[in-house]
Amino acid sequence: MTHSGKVYLVGAGPGDPGLMTLKGKALLECADVVVYDALVSAPILGMINPQAEQINAGKRKGMHSMLQEDITQLLIEKAKEAAIVVRLKGGDPFIFGRGGEEMEGLVEAGIPVEVVPGITSGIAAPAYAGIPLTHRNYSSSVTFVTGHEGAGKYRPAVNWQAIAHGSETIVIYMGIHNLAAIVEQLVAAGLSLATPVALVRWGTRPNQEELTGTLATIVQQVEEKQFGAPAIAVIGSVVNLHSVLSGCRPLR
C-alpha cells in the first residue's frame, strides 16, 4: 500500500499575521512541506517550520511560476513523500483561491485533504479601511465577485446587470486591471455615476493604501495615482463611512 500523508489547504488571511488562524499557524509550525502563494505575507512565511521544504507556487499577473494543474500534481507527489503538506493560500482557500479545484484533484487521487479557512481580503481590507460592508442604515446585503475571470470557465462572463441590482454593497476581487470595463457595465446596468467607490490596496498590511471616489471618477483617479493591484474594490453607500471610521485603524 502506497504511503500517503495529508494535505491541508490553509488560508493565510490577507497579510496581517495577527489574522492568521491558530489552527493554520500550528500546521505551519509542524509542516514537512509548504507550498505557498505569491500574496502570502513575509511575517506569515516566517511562521513556517524552519526544517520544512518551502515551495513558491505563486501566480501573479503575467508572471505565473506554476500552472494550476502542476500545483495540484505537486501536492499529490509531496503527499506521497511527507506526512504534513500545507498548501498555503492568501485569504481563504475557497474564496477565489482555486482551493476547490485543488481539493477535487487531491480527492480524485485518493489523497487525504482538509481545508482550514482563512479571513478573506474582501472582508478584512474594507474593515481595516473603516468600511463596514453591512450597516443598518446603508446596506443589508453584499455580493462578492471576481473582476478577473479565467479562460475556459463554466460561463463566459460575470452578469454585471444582475450584480448591479443584486445587493447594496458590491465587493470586487482582482478588478483593478478591468476596472474601466466593470464601471462601464455597472453604469450601463443602471447604477448612478454618483455611487461611491473605494479601492483598498495591500489590505491589512503596513503599506495599506486607499483611494475613494465615485463610479464617475474612480477610473481617472486610478490612472492619475497609478493605483495598482492587488486591491479590493467596494461599491455602495457604505463607502461614505470611510471618512468617519478610517481613523480607527487596528494595530499592526
Image (spheres, helix red, strand yellow):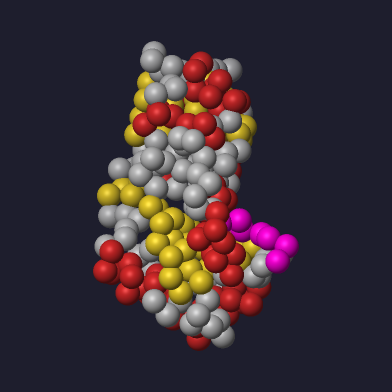
Label count reads 0
Q: What stretch is highlighted in magenta?
A: 131-137
At x 52% / y 40%, what residue is drawn? 250
Q: Please give left or right for residue 51 compared with residue 247 in the image.
A: left
At x 49% / y 36%, what residue is drawn? 251
Q: Can residue 87 be seen in this view?
A: no
Residue 17 part of the magenta-drawn span: no
- Residue placed most toward the observer, 96 or 154: 96
Give residue 218's quadrant in the image: bottom left
At x 40% / y 62%, what residue is drawn? 211
Q: Please give left or right for residue 118 compared with residue 230 in the image.
A: right
Q: In which quarter of the image is the C terminus?
A: top left
Residue 135 part of the magenta-drawn span: yes
Give residue 36's quadrant in the image: top left
Indicate whether 152 appears above or below 216: above
- Residue placed most toward the observer, 74 or 235: 235
Q: Where is residue 245 in the image (x, y as percent from the top left)?
A: 55, 54
Indicate whether 190 appears above or below 182: below
Q: Can residue 237 be seen in this view?
A: yes
Q: Where is residue 128 in the image (x, y as percent from the top left)?
A: 51, 47
